[in-house]
Amino acid sequence: METALKISLFIPCYVDQLSPHIGIAMVNVLERLGHEVNYPEGQTCCGQPAFNSGYFPEAKKVADHFLDTFADADLVAVPSGSCTAMIRKFYPELYQDSPQAKEVSELGGRVFEFTELLVNQLGVTDVGAKLNGTATYHDGCHGLRELGIQDAPRKLLENVQGLSLVEMDEAQSCCGFGGTFAIKFPQISTAMTQVKLGSATQTEADYLISGDPSCLMQIGGYFSRQKSSIQCLHIAEVLDQQ
């Protein structure tokens, strides 16, 4: 068995408030692999909503708190490509020419989206999960485009016993959420999710799986209103199945 590591959790706002079971599933998987999981209770938001809205000083205040909270973390696991990208890719913009720039860069190198942590850092592609059915995968924009995460979740899903993975044509298309985009442009946002539903339906999949909870909120909400039989799941929930 590999050496046990101490892994700190950063739980995004959407998971904390709306989908805490995703965080619990991530803990179950990591502990089953023999690692020590730590939850810094002082954590809050990563600052992405303010940053994306152009409120950079306000975003930096939130980021300051993140840096203080996770300063001593060996590894940080995040069930969201979006929040991981904020910390690793956009924090350096907030702290450019700042005395904290080096600290930001070093901490960013220890923060990983859940599937890339499992596959690329821990060397795990099979966690012993079981789930019967057919699934298709949605690539969240930040995870795919900012972090280059594409193969890791698929490698993990290919090793889920009983699960067949079928790619949809629009796997890499935006789901239409985009944070405030969905609020500012609801008709365009809805049309984008409609495309996602059509593409997923063509695969005849039982499940649509993603690594980003904000995408799943958008997609799952629309699928539900359209009476779709496709169940939306976070990949941590799938990997937690025994």
Image (cartoon, rainbow, N blue to C red):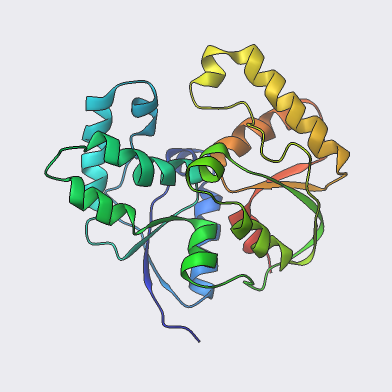
150, above or below 44, in the image: below
Viewer-closest of 32 and 122: 122
The image shows residue 160 at horizontal and vertical percentages of 72, 66
93 left or right of 178?
A: left
Q: Position of residue 33 (x, y in %)?
A: 52, 75
Residue drawn 48% across the image and 71% down it: 122
Count of marks overlaid on the render? 0
Pick the residue in front: 140 or 240.
140
- In the image, what residue occupies the spot 61% across and 52% down? 150
- Whole-percent x and y of residue 165? 78, 56
Q: Quadrant of residue 162?
A: bottom right
Front residue of 210 and 92:
92
Q: Using the rendered image of the protein, determine whether residue 70 is visible from the camera's viewpoint.
A: no
Q: Nearer the viewer, residue 182 or 95?
A: 95
Classify 49 as above or below 7. Answer: above
What is the x, y in percent for residue 94? Answer: 25, 34
Instruction: Please give the name of the residue rendered at 53% of the width and 27% of the height, measured from the top-left corner.
Output: 178
Residue plotted at (77% across, 32% down):
197
Name, please, the residue furthest toward the bottom: 1
Q: Is residue 166 visible?
A: yes
Q: On the rendered image, what quadrant is the C terminus found in?
A: bottom right
- Is residue 165 left or right of 174 when viewed as pictured? right
